[in-house]
Amino acid sequence: MSAPVLMDWLDRPLDLPGYQARKVPGAGVDLNLVAGVGDDRPPLLLLPGLNDPWFSYGPVLAPLSRHFSVYVPDWRGHGPSDRDPGGGYQVRHYAMDAAAVLERQIGRPTIVAGNSLGALVAAHLAAELPDLVCGAVLEDGPFFITEPSRWAGHPLREKLFGPVTALLGRRDGGELDEDGFVAAYGERIWGYAVSDRFEDRLVHLGKLMVHLRPLIEPLPAADQARLRAGMLGFVRGGDVAWRDLLPPPLLSDAARIAWRLDTACPAGALAADFSQGIDHGADLAAIRCPVLVLEADRDLVGLLSAADIDHLMGSLGRTRAEHLLVEGGLHAIHASRPDIYLRAVMSMFARPENGRP
């Protein structure tokens, strides 16, 4: 979540010096790929989270581009990329698309950095294509929890993907136009609270306000009052809709991005077999390149437990790995705390043995 990113890039033609957007072949579908032109710097492949567009990396693209040749795709079913008529939207399908980009468009040792779904894919590529992946950044990836045995009963599965799937179904059926979709999108229940305890919700909201306050202060008094009421309801333990927590410009842009999705994208993540065929532990154990693990603030997101993080880092025992818990970082750390993201990536991969001159 990063309002300046969405408002700056949504529906705007690509205007990034030295870069171009083009369609390239994935695994049976064509993908929109934004990439440097004629750049011989070390390659860096950025993989967004599910439902996120390529420009979610807007806050870090220019700084990274001073050191790397950056490639970032839109996933299948997202934005200008093709939809898969066969409904192939499991983690393994996204991994095959990313492998096609890595092999056919880059073709040399690359640092692969992924957020959320992208982190799962980055780990799989590092395990399966060791000659082409010389470093990996795993940014708040849902390791272990999205494996079938846990994902089927995980509370975030339905909260995050059920409402979006239902709304897109109403769009596909002609019930909602884009304006109606945007309005209905705001009725989703906020699902990121770490618990129902007053103290936990108060801490969650306080940290969230660091990101939201600059967007709330310019709003009309009526909107500010509505959001304050929603926040009070939230800390008291109630179910609160997104429209009662998030500033309208941010909510509108998030909804318009979702409007462009293939319904099968969130429906695929809603299925218990989303990670079928991907063994997270085996992937992590097979990695031999250096790995940077970035974890979002547990008070804000809390996807993985401390035990899951220990399991993740323990699985990386045969390579050099570093873990950073990012205070104040939302799920997309690169968008919410770009300063920390850039410092960590540059520190880890600015050494000759890690793919940088």
Image (spheres, grey):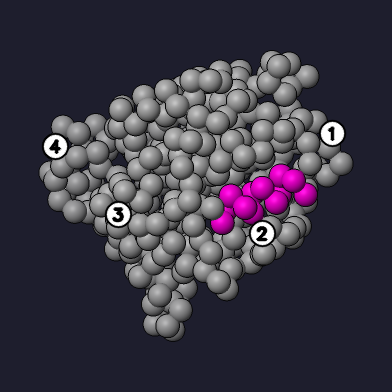
Q: Position of residue 234 (x, y in %)?
A: 19, 46
Amino acid type at mark 1 = Asp
Q: Position of residue 174 (x, y in %)?
A: 44, 84
- Residue 198: mark: 4
N-term mark: 4 or 1: 1
Amino acid type at mark 4 = Phe
Magenta span covers which residues? 93-104
Q: Nearer the viewer, mark 1 or mark 2?
A: 2
Query: Is residue 91 a member of the stretch shown in magenta?
Result: no
Q: CA distance from mark 4 to mark 3?
A: 28 Å
> Crowding near pointer 3: few (<14 within 10 Å), some, many (20+)?
some
N-term mark: 1 or 2: 2
Dots 2, 4 in contact, CB < 8 A = no
Foreground of the two, 296 or 128: 128
Residue beneath the point at 22% across and 54% down: 240
- Could you tell me if residue 24 is visible in this image? yes
